[in-house]
Every structure is written in C-alpha cells, then in structure tokens.
Image (tube, rainbow, N blue to C red):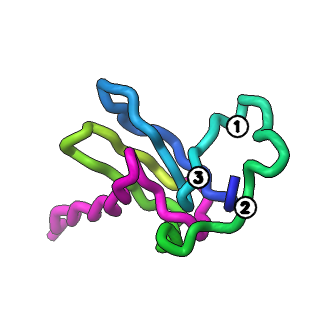
C-alpha cells in the first residue's frame, strides 16, 4: 500500500485485470496485510492522485470505480491510467 486511496467497484469487467494505485497492486481490505517491504512511496509516474466522490471508468473494458477515500496515487488497470468519468448534466427544471 502506497497511499490511502480506497475505491468501490461499481462495475467489474468480464475478464481478470490488474488494478493498481500509485504503481502498486491494490488489495482487498479483507485480505491479510502485505508482507514487510511491499509498501513504499508513490511512483512519480503514477502520482496524479484521485478525488473523493469521483468515478473512474473505462467503457472498453467495462470497469467503473468510485473513489471513497482520495489519495496521491493514480488508479490504473493493466498499467493504463483510468480516466475520471465526467458528470452528466442534470436536466433543467423550470
């Protein structure tokens, strides 16, 4: 674990993928802790950060994540950063 980023999987892809944050594999919080030395600083190439309450998605892969705790690391799938999903404008109510 390189930072405190926490994500909820809103939509999972149909295939196995590698999910990383800050250049390090993310873990299920229910799993046993990482072995000593498996943590470290955020990789500078993966340090764009995440924003609380924002969704990150790749429609091609069919994956969507919701950030419940922001952090410094960039979330990536199979080494490719997940773009932030843009909000849809609400209809006007006159």
- Give the Cα distance between marks 2 and 3: 9 Å
Q: Residue furthest top?
A: 14
Main SS type for the magenta part? loop
Above or below: residue 47 compared with residue 52: below
**Residue 55 appears at what percent x and percent y?**
39, 55
Above or below: residue 51 compared with residue 39: below
Q: Which residue is mark 1?
A: 29
Residue 59 in the magenta stretch? The answer is no
Say which quarter of the image contains residue 10. top left
Q: Residue furthest front?
A: 37
- Give the Cα distance between marks 2 and 1: 18 Å
Marking on residue 40: 2
**Residue 73 appears at what percent x and percent y?**
56, 65
Dot 2 or dot 1, earlier in sequence? 1
Marking on residue 48: none
Q: Secondary structure at mark 2?
A: loop
Q: Secondary structure at mark 1?
A: loop
What's the residue at 68%, 59% (across, down)?
2
Dot 2 or dot 3, earlier in sequence? 3
Q: Magenta residues?
A: 68-94
Q: Residue furthest right?
A: 36
Q: Which residue is mark 3?
A: 24
Say which quarter of the image contains residue 13. top left
Q: Is residue 43 left or right of residue 11?
A: right
């Amino acid at each position: 674990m390189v930072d405190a980023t926490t994500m909820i999987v809103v939509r999972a892809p149909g295939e196995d993928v590698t999910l990383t944050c800050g250049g390090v594999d993310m873990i299920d919080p229910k799993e046993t802790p990482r072995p000593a030395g498996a943590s470290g600083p955020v990789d500078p190439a993966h340090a764009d950060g995440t924003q609380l309450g924002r969704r990150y998605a790749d429609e091609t892969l069919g994956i969507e994540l919701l950030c419940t705790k922001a952090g410094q690391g960039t979330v990536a799938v199979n080494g490719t950063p997940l773009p932030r999903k843009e909000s849809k404008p609400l209809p006007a109510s006159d």
